[in-house]
Image (tube, rainbow, N blue to C red):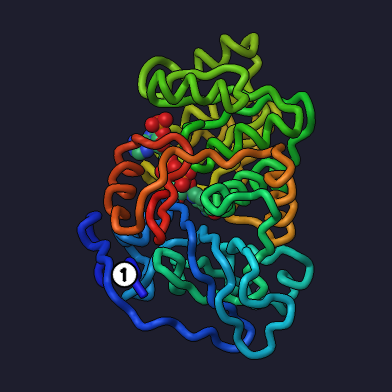
Amino acid sequence: MRAVVIHEHGGPEVLQLVERGLPEPRPDEVRVAVQAVGLNHLDTWVRRGVPGHRFPLPMIPGCDLAGVVDAVGEGVEHLRPGDRVLAAPGLSCGHCAACARGDDQLCADYGILGETRDGGCADFACLPARNALPLPDGLEMVAAAAFPLTFLTAWHMLVARCRLVPGEVVLVHAAGSGVGSAAVQIARLHGARVIATAGTPDKRRLALELGADEVLPSREGDLVAAVRGLTGKRGVDIVVEHVGEATFGDSLRCLARGGRVVTCGATTGPRLAADLRHLFFKNLSILGSTMGSRGELLQIVGLVARGLLRPVVDRVLPLARVAEGHRALEQREVFGKIVLVPGGVA
Ligand SMILES: NC(=O)c1ccc[n+]([C@@H]2O[C@H](COP(=O)([O-])OP(=O)(O)OC[C@H]3O[C@@H](n4cnc5c(N)ncnc54)[C@H](OP(=O)(O)O)[C@@H]3O)[C@@H](O)[C@H]2O)c1
Ligand SMILES: [Zn+2]
């Protein structure tokens, strides 16, 4: 089979398309013939490397894959060859207390396909059978590969961590990012007023189409003043943060009394500078969030199948053009997701 393999960290040129033997499913695993695999910012971290963190190289990246079950390992009874599936990207032990109560993202052995073991940027991929979720009829492969990681993350941030209720005002940074495009829709679905930011006029237009009530520029102007202007000086109840150092200070200043900022990422850097007085006098909360449970993902799959949440696909590329996809993500040229198709673009 063909596979994109990262042998060493570096620029997009380290993404090599190579021939590899077909992987054999171990007990309780399935092998999936990959029909679509979505790119995430995560793939760029895995490719570049993160100081102080060791990735198990060489590795096949890619966590959001959809395809058809091609072979099943010993002990797999609920899936058979020919079944259409999408991958739940999070890997966990399945038997610790956190897993047992449905908090698998808190498992001490938590990992992600394409980050801690081989992922889906290949013709075939093996994964634990419990991670292969049935793909509802009518949900296309490309769409199925364009939402699991980011929608799960945004859902967990807003619903589980922030406990968003109808009528609250939510600020979503970078509505064109994978996480942002999910957060705008999830906040709307829960009855929030959504103020979004985006870097270009095109992205701002698309953010409005996605359901944002108002969209502000992210690369110019005073965000805090603009948010205060839109909210009668009150500020917002929730800020969805993933940009990091470049925006975190403003995110805190945009909050109303009792507000919370929830963060899952640090695209522009991990350092946090905050005035503690501002934090306690205004009763603010800073919440960290990573991934979410398989139960939450199943809920999301149902909402996507019903058309209540919509995966946003910027472009579809053949697998061999993976490096072009990474460059586009890093240059902020994408609204929504880039999806690779090993079988080629129809
Ligand atoms: N902890 C978790 O579970 C989890 C899950 C998913 C993602 N994440 C993290 O969350 C972040 C977003 O992920 P994603 O996949 O949604 O990313 P993405 O699709 O690549 O979007 C990143 C966006 O960040 C915005 N941005 C603002 N300032 C930037 C700057 N100086 N440099 C680059 N981009 C800038 C850009 O939007 P504009 O051009 O509109 O400004 C860009 O579109 C990443 O850091 C990712 O690792 C974490
Ligand atoms: Zn566990």
Residue at 70% x, 55% y is 136
Q: Is mark 1 within 8 Å of ligand 1?
A: no
The image quarter in which residue 281 lies: top right
Spot occupied by residue 74 in the image (x, y as percentages of width and height): 64, 90
In front: 169, or 65?
65
Spot occupied by residue 202 in the image (x, y as percentages of width and height): 41, 21
The image quarter in which residue 208 lies: top right
Spot occupied by residue 82 in the image (x, y as percentages of width and height): 62, 71
Residue at 59% x, 22% y is 195
Report the quarter where the N terminus lies.
bottom left
- Residue 246 visible somewhere in the drawing: no
Disc 1 crowd rating (10 Å Cα; few below 14, some 14-19, many 20+) is many
Spot occupied by residue 198 in the image (x, y as percentages of width and height): 45, 26
Q: Residue furthest front?
A: 346
Residue at 34% x, 71% y is 2
Q: Above or below — where is 222 with respect to 343?
A: above
Q: What type is the residue that disc 1 sits on?
A: Val
Residue at 43% x, 16% y is 222
List the residue tagged with mark 1.
5
Q: Image check: 332 left or right of 109?
A: left
Counting labels gives 1
Q: Image check: 222 left or right of 212?
A: left
- Residue 64 visible somewhere in the drawing: yes
In front: 161, or 281?
161
Name the quadrant where ligand 1 sits: top left
Element carrying mark 1: strand
Q: Image check: 249 left or right of 7?
A: right
